[in-house]
Image (cartoon, helix red, strand yellow):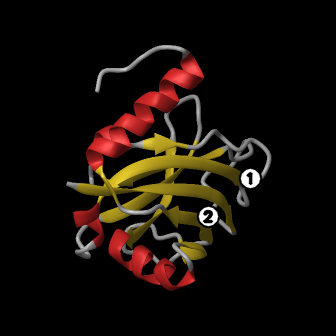
Amino acid sequence: MECRKLELTINSANDLRGVRRMFKMKVYAKVLIGGNQEMEKRTPVDKHGRTNPAWNYTMKYSISEQWLEHHGTMLVIKLYCKRKLGDRYIGEVHQSLKQLYDYASPLGGSAVVCFPVQMGCAESQGQLCFSYRFGEKVAIEKLMLAESIASFLVTGQGGAI
């Protein structure tokens, strides 16, 4: 089976819908690929940007080559406002991995894009900007070996292959 590395950097959002009346908004993003909860990652909380947060936070994924062949595998980025009494949903962006790959391929495999933030059936409110880069296609066994070696070099602890 073949896969690719995906490096995703959540850059910023702007003109988001304000979901707090009393205190300033502290926004973070949750990223999910293909509905796989084990692949969920999140940015740190931006405590200063309010409705215009900036993260410039990079996440790395290993994704199946099959996910780039069909429009059904989605990249979902959900935005939340951090609160003591439970975080409040702001909105989200959905994009097909295939569509992102097809757009970036002629550009050397990487791109910077901005998409409107949607909240259910309501009109979009603001936009989210992120950059991404797809790596070369490799056999999953080679990728696992490379990740294990890198982990050992960084932490000094070996991982099972």
Q: Nearer the viewer, residue 113 or 50?
A: 113
Category of crowding for the residue at label 2, using alpha-carbon neighbours closer than 10 angstroms: few (below 14), some (14–19), many (at least 20)? some
Image: 64 above or below 141? below
Residue 52 placement, left or right of 111: right
Residue 35 placement, left or right of 11: left
Q: Nearer the viewer, residue 24 or 111?
A: 111
Decide which of tag 2 and tag 1 comes sooner along the chain: 2
Q: Are marks 2 and 1 in contact (CB under 8 Å)?
A: no
On the question of residue 128 being in view, the answer is yes
- Dot 1 lies on which element? loop
Instruction: Classify residue 72 by image quadrant.
Output: bottom left
- Dot 2 lies on which element? loop
Q: Nearer the viewer, residue 9 or 35?
A: 9
Residue wearing tag 2: 17
Residue in the image at 52% along x and 69% along y: 117
Q: Which mark is residue 84?
A: none
| x then y, percent, for residue 112 | 62, 73
Instruction: Return the residue found at the far bottom.
Output: 106
Instruction: Return the residue found at the far top.
Output: 157
Category of crowding for the residue at label 1, using alpha-carbon neighbours closer than 10 angstroms: few (below 14), some (14–19), many (at least 20)? many
Residue wearing tag 1: 50
Residue in the image at 38% along x and 68% along y: 120
| x then y, percent, for residue 17 | 61, 64
Image: 112 above or below 90? below
Image: 39 above or below 91? above
Quadrant where the C terminus sits is top left
| x then y, percent, for residue 27 | 63, 47
Instruction: Classify residue 1 by image quadrant.
Output: bottom left
On the question of residue 29 being in view, the answer is no
Spatial separation of the CA atoms under disc 2 and disc 1: 10 Å
Q: Amino acid at mark 1?
A: Arg
Q: Amino acid at mark 2?
A: Arg
